Image (cartoon, rainbow, N blue to C red):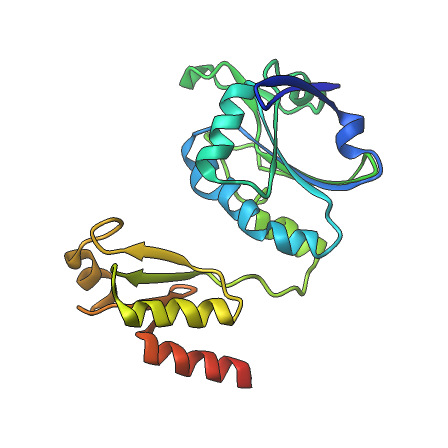
Amino acid sequence: MVFRTRRDHEWVEVSTGDEFKGKTVVVFALPGAFTPTCSSTHVPRYNQLAPVFKAHDIDDIVCISVNDAFVMNEWRAGQKAWNLIFLPDGNGDFTRGMGMLVPKTDLGFGERSWRYSMLVRDGIIEKMFVEPEQPGDPFEVSDADTMLEYVAPHVAKPLDVSVFTRKGCSFCARAKGMLRDAGIEFEELILNEHYTERSLRAITGAVSVPQIFVNGERVGNSDDLAAWLEQREAA
C-alpha cells in the first residue's frame, strides 16, 4: 500500500513498509480534515501528547484521513501539528483495506474513514480502539489519552496551562519566565488579540493580568504562581 504525499512541492510515495517496518507507531484515523471534532480535539491532543508517547518508545504518531495530500498538508500547517505525520488516503485504499471505509453521503462527504486508533509494532497491529457503531461521529475511545493509558498506564500527563496577559506587562513577563524556567508549556492569551477585558472579568473574575489557569483551575497572578510553583516543587 502506498500513500501519495507532497513534500517541498514534490510528490513523494510513502509505503506502509516505510512507515511501519521496524517501528512502533501509533495511528489514528478520522473522518475528515478541517472537520470540528478532528480539528478541535483529536489532532491537537495527539500533537500535545506526542513527546510523552515518544518518551515511551513510540517512534511515530500518524494521522490518516480520506483526503488528498494538498488538503492534509494545509490542515497540518493550520493545526501546527508538527509532532505528527499526516498520511493522505485520498482514494480510501488503506481505509478500505482496514475495513473502516464507511458512507458519509448524508453529509455530502462520500466515503470516509470511521474513527479509530491502533498501536502497530513492526507492521503488526497490537491493539485497536474502534469507536462504537452509533449514529453520527462517536468519539469515545480513539482519543490520545486512551491510547496513552494503554501504552504507559501510570505516566504523568502534561499540564494544561493558560496565561492571560497584555503587551508590555512586566508581571506577565515574570509569570511566563517562571513557567519556562519550570519547564512547563503554556498557551498565552493576549488582551485585545485573543480576549477582551469583558472576557477577562467573565472568565477569571479579575480585572488585572496576568491570570494563570492550570488544568481548569485558577492559580491567580504572578505572586500566586510563584507560591504554586514552590509548593509543587516541594511536593
In this image, 146 relative to 162: left or right?
Answer: right
Q: Nearer the viewer, residue 40 or 224?
A: 224
| Residue 25 percent across, percent down from the top left | 73, 41
Residue displayed at 53% across by 44% down = 140
| Residue 17 percent across, percent down from the top left | 81, 27
136 lies above or below 150: above
In this image, 87 relative to 231: left or right?
Answer: right
Q: Nearer the viewer, residue 129 or 186?
A: 186
Residue displayed at 72% across by 56% down = 56
Q: Is residue 118 visible?
A: yes
In this image, 25 relative to 158: left or right?
Answer: right
Please, which residue is most extreme toward the left here?
198
Q: Nearer the viewer, residue 25 or 73?
A: 73
Q: Is residue 32 visible?
A: no
| Residue 218 percent across, percent down from the top left | 34, 70
Q: Nearer the viewer, residue 196 or 166?
A: 166
121 lies above or below 176: above
6 lies above or below 57: above
Which of the 4 quarters of the picture holds residue 163? bottom left
- State the count of labels: 0
Report the quarter where the N terminus lies: top right
Report the quarter where the C terminus lies: bottom right
| Residue 158 percent across, percent down from the top left | 54, 61
